[in-house]
Image: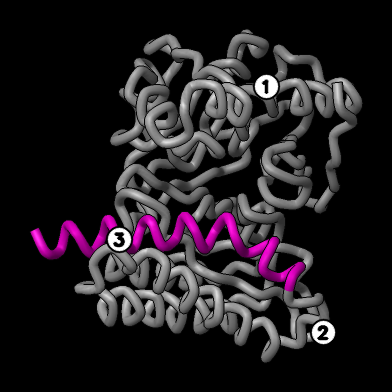
Amino acid sequence: MRKVYFEDLGHGITMIDAQLYRQGQVSTYLVVEDERAAFVETGTAHSVPGLLQVLDLKGIPRENVDFVIPTHVHLDHAGGAGELLRHLPAARLVIHPRGARHMVDPARLNAGAAAVYGEAEMERLFGTVVPVVEDRVIQADDGFILDFNGRQLRFLDTPGHARHHFCVVDETGDGIFTGDTFGLSYREFDTDRGPFVLPTTTPVQFDPDALHTSVDRLVAEGLQYMYLTHYSRVDDLSRLQTDMHDLIDAFVALARNHAQDGPVRHEILYAEMMALLLGRLRDHGCPLPEDEMRRLLHPDVELNVQGLEVWLDKAES
């Protein structure tokens, strides 16, 4: 078993690296309240040994975990939920109503990932999505309040990245677990100006108007932090809010400018989005060599362009 990286953030919250893709790309969170515990996000099935390792290191019995809470059902967020629950006898899954059926019967999730990556690569990246027994599932609508051992967790429906996405307001932690709604912010891009953020427009449910609304709704809660899945905790939220809106609009403008570019559309969109983000990183004061910035940005630029193309094709149909 690989040694897992984790960081205690205060307020009973521990960020645990999901050991997916590379260290520093996917976060999960362990929240502890007076000896009871909950996980927010799970990573994949391959992430589960690391999550259990942190429980053991902290001396938390597995029967003390009450909830497993993926923000949405994309595999880097929820792919390990069923496997994790197999090891947590008292825990229940809390999930968006639109995503619940995919956790109970993950056949479509497995098939969709296999179609994109191929069976062998899907297994290497994600493992198998294990079904969750239906009577262990709690569906959290907009405004749902979960009593976690006296600690109130409040759920906000936040479409834009996906229609089956909620964010989790944790006033005790002075922040919100945002999944992908408040974008991506990798610690390698931090400078004296603070964190750098970019939106994620991955397939297949990107909705720019809804995402603008969701971003504003999160900031309007008036808390200090966003606990991102990609990656870890950020503050300076007013500036990041402005940057998110600006880049959502910039991505949409890129897509519309090249909507009719046919077979070369993907290549052009990729090149222009990469150039846009490299320019923003230079303006942000990022000292990394361009090759390193490109390497770190590549997976998200590729997925973002795929999502923009799906959005364009739906708009034109």
Residue at 66% of width from left, 46% of height from top? 26
The picture quadrant where one finds residue 84 is top right
Q: Which residue is mark 3?
A: 309
Say what secondary structure mark 1 lies in.
strand
Q: Amino acid at mark 1?
A: Val
Question: Picture quarter containing residue 140?
Answer: top left
x and y, in percent, of residue 244 in the image:
49, 76
**Amino acid type of the residue tagged 2 in the rendering:** Asp
Is residue 13 something one can see in this rendering?
A: no
Q: Considering the numbered disc 3 on the image, is that residue within a helix, a strand or a loop?
A: helix
Q: Residue at x 59, y 37 (%)?
A: 41
Q: Which mark is residue 65?
A: 1
Q: Label 1: few (<14), some or many (≥20) within 10 Å? A: many
- Against 29, is 220 above or below? below
Could you tell me which residue is drawn at 44 percent across and 40 percent down? 72
Q: Which residue is mark 2?
A: 192
Q: Is label 2 in contact with label 1 (beta carbons under 8 Å)?
A: no
Q: Quadrant of the N terminus?
A: top right
Q: Amino acid at mark 3?
A: Glu
For the residue pair 147 and 234, the one nearer the viewer reads as 234
Q: Residues within 10 Å of mark 2 (few under 14, many from 20)?
A: few
- Look at the image and tell me whether residue 36 can be seen: yes
Q: Mark 2: which secondary structure?
A: loop
> Which residues, given as a range, are shown in magenta?
291-317
Count of numbered tags: 3
Residue 149 covered by magenta stretch: no
Q: Percent x, y for residue 295?
A: 69, 62
Note whether 95 is above or below 299 in the view shown: above
**Residue at the front extreme, as displayed:** 263
Q: Position of residue 45 (x, y in %)?
A: 62, 22
Foreground mark, 3 or 2? Answer: 3
- Mark 3 or 1: in front is 3
